[in-house]
Image (cartoon, coloured by chain):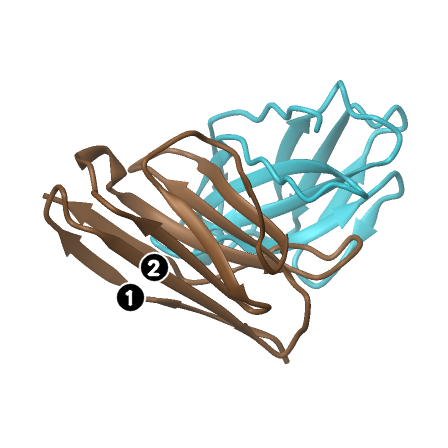
Chain colours: A cyan, B brown
Amino acid sequence: DAKTTQPPSMDCAEGRAANLPCNHSTISGNEYVYWYRQIHSQGPQYIIHGLKNNETNEMASLIITEDRKSSTLILPHATLRDTAVYYCIVRRDNTDKLIFGTGTRLQVFP
Amino acid sequence: SQTIHQWPATLVQPVGSPLSLECTVEGTSNPNLYWYRQAAGRGLQLLFYSIGIDQISSEVPQNLSASRPQDRQFILSSKKLLLSDSGFYLCAWRGQGRSPLHFGNGTRLTVT
């Protein structure tokens, strides 16, 4: 599976958009990008995933660059409850091994 | 709807004692099952994953083992715990295809 690189930490003001980047420059054509987040002392929560088209759901939007070497998770109006560690992982459609990186610690401040 | 149960929530065990953590999934059949460990302030480390009964892959050589005696039951074990086994243990499941992972609430293990 392709390795992902994320900044270790980011800050965002409450009510503003949080844009979390992920680099996956070695991604291959059949690998999906998944995003999860982990609030302190809880199990990670699935947010969104995509292959090459931009995706949006009730939690966030996922923007994948045309060459698919990077993506951005967008929380359009961050709240204090969005403070968490955000993980970006890539997975081939036919593999069961899911490896997490160290993620980005997002701190939303008032 | 599908749910995942993981217990206990917290556990304190002495060095050298055995360990058994259990995870069960409800509301689905033939799930893929996973055990992850998270050391304090660190990321998630994949320990084991299973695509079916008695089909388990080990990712990291260590003091732990996993078993899947039933379709929706995944057990993490150790015969003799080490101090380094302390951490936050997470069980997860996913369906087939592109289904995302769904995690349990975790077990915080402290080996003293």
- What number is the disc on residue B8? 1
Relative to residue A62, is residue B18 drawn left or right? Answer: left
Residue A40 showing in the rendered view: no
**Quick one: quadrant of the N terminus of chain A?**
top right
Q: Which residue is farthest top?
A: A25
Which residue is pictured at 14% across the width and 52% down the height?
A: B13
Which residue is pictured at 42% across the width and 29% down the height?
A: B61
- In the figure, B9 relative to A8: above or below? below
Q: Nearer the viewer, mark 2 or mark 1?
A: 2
Q: Quadrant of residue A95?
A: top right
Earlier along the polypeptide chain: callout 2 or callout 1?
A: 1
Q: Chain of mark 2?
A: B
Give the class, few, some or many, for how many residues have Cα within 10 Å of label 2's Cα (few <14, many ≥20): many
- In the figure, B84 relative to B9: above or below? above
Which residue is pictured at 37% across the width and 50% down the height?
A: B89
Q: Amino acid at mark 1?
A: Pro
Q: Chain of mark 1?
A: B
Q: x and y percent of residue B7 in the render?
A: 33, 67
Which residue is pictured at 23% across the width and 33% down the height?
A: B84
- In the figure, A36 relative to A7: above or below? below
Residue A37 showing in the rendered view: yes
Relative to residue B10, is residue B100 drawn left or right? Answer: right
Judged from the image, the secondary structure of the residue bearing numbered disc 1 is loop
- Contact (CB < 8 A) between labels 2 and 1? yes
Q: Amino acid at mark 2?
A: Leu
Q: Which residue is mark 2?
A: B21
Comparing A37 with A58, the one in front is A37
Q: CA distance from mark 2 to mark 1?
A: 7 Å
Q: x and y percent of residue A75 in the render?
A: 63, 49
Q: x and y percent of residue B18 in the render?
A: 21, 51
Q: How many marks?
A: 2
- Whether callout 2 and callout 1 share a subunit is answered yes
